[in-house]
């Protein structure tokens, strides 16, 4: 049973990596900033880094997803309960991955906890605890990220696309400062302008950079920050399956989960990547950067506060918000994603209940 529990937990992590690892780089590949292989490799590195960082940043999530508080402690630590939760989560997420739907592993875990809890504890499942600690953050986060995405894009598009040169021109003397009746000079201040290349060619410049190329670098860094944030937020939830069974210490559980997530992403991420990068909306560099910064900020903040948000929901929300503001959303593809979200929790609950009853 112990080896079966370990294998089930690692299969959950592999499925999670396959469905979630690439999501931070969806806008990077979608805007042709990087090739799929380069984006996938960077996503794997950033996710593993975030997973290891979760040891220090998100320890409270381990206890939340161990089932404590939702069901009696004796049930939460029972091998059959943990096996049912792991099997349901893995089956649900892996099926969605093969179908190309970017679903929430957090939703699947919660569904598994409910289904296994009802099968093992019956009326002792504390659904009020579930609503307060889990469902509210999951429902609010995609709406918030979509609204922020719409607002941020309206602000970002104020810059004219032809203004691609940021340059420092001849320094402007600063006004003198009077101190104690004497006048002291100040250092010259640099004069920074953002204009077209043609304009910058006509003025003497001390340094110049391309705004679009700088945005590309920022876009990639923002994608890595999302993968890092996802690793911080998701790894403790999956490590909880091993910790609750008292099989491994928290640190070792997180390391094993991180490796399994990396392998899953490298092997099985392609279909979900195509949905996120090509079907929901097509973005340019600025739009992608805007969506990514919102996603990374919200997920990292949630991890620090111990709120179990879904990186999938936040990421799709910000991409959809920016895309809607730009008038480029594929509503049919987005509708399919939303329906898969609705189905994730009940499917996982039914599978977990069946495993707990029949095993």
Image: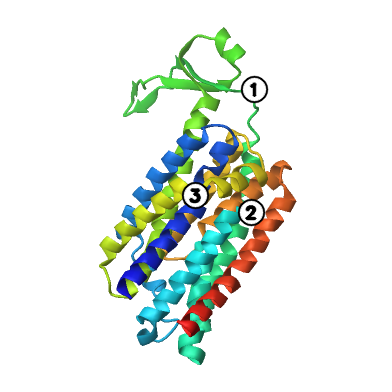
Indicate whether 242 appears above or below 172.
below
Side of 350 relative to 335 (left or right)? left
In this figure, which residue is indicated by the disc labeled 1?
Answer: 162
Label 2: which secondary element: helix
Question: Residue 57's image quarter?
Answer: bottom left
Q: Nearer the viewer, mark 1 or mark 3?
A: 3
Which of pointers 1 and 2 lies earlier in the amino acid sequence?
Answer: 2
Which of pointers 1 and 3 lies earlier in the amino acid sequence?
Answer: 1
Question: Residue 183's image quarter?
Answer: top left
Using the image, tell me which numbered label, if any, was put on residue 152.
none
In this figure, which residue is indicated by the disc labeled 3?
Answer: 268
Towards the viewer: 258 or 142? 258
Residue 232 image point, x, y percent = 39, 56
Mark 2, residues whose alpha carbon is within 10 Å: few (<14), some, or many (≥20)?
Answer: some
Instruction: Tell me which residue sits at (59%, 71%) in the image.
Output: 347
Mark 3, residues whose alpha carbon is within 10 Å: few (<14), some, or many (≥20)?
Answer: some
In this figure, which residue is indicated by the disc labeled 2?
Answer: 147
CA gap between label 1 and label 3 equals 39 Å
Question: Residue 3's image quarter?
Answer: bottom left
Side of 339 relative to 125 (left or right)? right
Residue 106 showing in the rendered view: no
């Amino acid at each position: 049973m112990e080896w079966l529990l370990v294998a089930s937990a690692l299969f959950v992590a592999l499925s999670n990596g396959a469905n979630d690892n690439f999501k931070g780089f969806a806008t990077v590949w979608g805007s042709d900033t990087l090739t799929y292989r380069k984006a996938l490799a960077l996503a794997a590195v950033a996710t593993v880094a975030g997973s290891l960082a979760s040891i220090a940043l998100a320890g409270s999530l381990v206890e939340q997803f161990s089932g404590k508080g939702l069901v009696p402690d004796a049930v939460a630590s029972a091998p059959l309960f943990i096996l049912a939760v792991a099997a349901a989560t893995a089956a649900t997420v892996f099926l969605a991955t093969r179908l190309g739907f970017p679903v929430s592993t957090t939703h699947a875990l919660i569904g598994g906890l409910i289904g296994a809890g009802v099968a093992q504890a019956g009326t002792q499942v504390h659904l009020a605890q579930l609503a307060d600690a889990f469902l509210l953050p999951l429902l609010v986060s995609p709406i918030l990220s979509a609204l922020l995405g719409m607002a941020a894009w309206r602000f970002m598009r104020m810059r004219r696309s032809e203004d691609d040169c940021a340059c420092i021109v001849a320094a402007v003397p600063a006004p003198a400062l009077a101190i104690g009746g004497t006048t002291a000079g100040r250092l010259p201040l640099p004069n920074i302008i953002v204009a077209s290349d043609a304009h910058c060619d006509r003025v003497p410049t001390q340094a110049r950079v391309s705004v679009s190329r700088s945005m590309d670098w920022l876009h990639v860094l923002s994608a890595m920050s999302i993968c890092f944030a996802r690793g911080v937020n998701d790894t403790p939830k999956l490590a909880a399956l091993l910790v609750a069974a008292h099989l491994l210490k928290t640190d070792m559980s997180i390391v094993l989960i991180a490796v399994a997530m990396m392998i899953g992403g490298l092997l099985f991420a392609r279909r979900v990547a195509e949905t996120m990068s090509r079907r929901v909306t097509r973005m340019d560099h600025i739009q992608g950067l805007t969506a990514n910064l919102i996603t990374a900020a919200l997920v990292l903040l949630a991890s620090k506060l111990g709120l179990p948000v879904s990186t999938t929901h936040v990421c799709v929300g910000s991409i959809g918000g920016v895309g809607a503001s730009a008038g480029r959303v594929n509503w049919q593809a987005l509708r399919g994603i939303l329906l898969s979200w609705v189905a994730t929790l009940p499917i996982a609950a039914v599978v977990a209940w069946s495993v707990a009853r029949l095993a």
